């Protein structure tokens, strides 16, 4: 049952995390314009490693856990807004 609750929480968090990313990176787009399934790196949103560091810092401040640069799963975590949001929903402390 906790899996379905986590999925619901993650879906509900997508607009909030999109807003966090827009604010942290000063993106010239609306949070609703970020495709939840588009890649964050390269051809998708076009973020680079510095942008990802900024997002990780904002996430740690907002949700109370560290996204580490040496995390084994970081490629999967940052694969899309949906993946990042799912990771946040699973690990957040606040």
Image: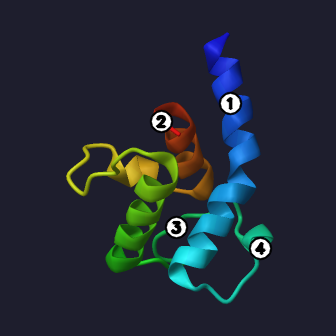
Pinpoint residue 36: horizontal percent, then vertical percent. Answer: 68, 57
Q: Tell which tag, 2 or 4, sits nearer the viewer.
A: 2
Give me the residue at 50% from left, 48% from top.
63
Label 2 or label 4, whichever comes before in sequence order: 4
* Residue to which mark 1 is pinned: 7
* Residue to which mark 3 is pinned: 40
Label 3 or label 2, whichever comes before in sequence order: 3
- SS class of the residue under badge 4? helix
Give me the residue at 41% from left, 76% from top.
51
Q: Sort mark 2 into few (<14), some (14-19) or many (20+) by Cα contacts within 10 Å.
A: few
Q: Residue furthest right?
A: 32
Pinpoint residue 15: horizontal percent, then vertical percent. Answer: 74, 58
Q: Residue furthest top?
A: 1
Q: Tell which tag, 1 or 3, sits nearer the viewer.
A: 1
Task: Give above or below for 17 relative to 65.
Answer: below
* Residue to which mark 4 is pinned: 33
Task: Give above or below for 87 relative to 28.
Answer: above
**Separation (CA) of disc 1 from disc 3:** 20 Å
Q: In the figure, is residue 57 to the left or right of 26?
A: left
**Separation (CA) of disc 2 from disc 1:** 16 Å
Pinpoint residue 29: horizontal percent, then vertical percent. Answer: 72, 84
Label 1 or label 3, whichever comes before in sequence order: 1
- SS class of the residue under badge 3? loop
Task: Mark 4 and mark 3 in contact? Answer it, CB < 8 Å.
Answer: no
């Amino acid at each position: 049952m906790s899996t379905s609750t986590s999925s619901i929480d993650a879906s509900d968090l997508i607009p909030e995390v999109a807003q966090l990313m827009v604010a942290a990176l000063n993106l010239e787009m609306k949070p609703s314009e970020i495709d939840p399934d588009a890649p964050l790196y390269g051809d998708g949103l076009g973020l680079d490693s510095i942008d990802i560091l900024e997002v990780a810092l904002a996430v740690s401040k907002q949700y109370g856990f560290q996204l580490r640069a040496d995390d084994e799963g970081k490629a999967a975590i940052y694969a899309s807004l949906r993946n990042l949001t799912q990771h946040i929903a699973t690990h957040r402390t606040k």
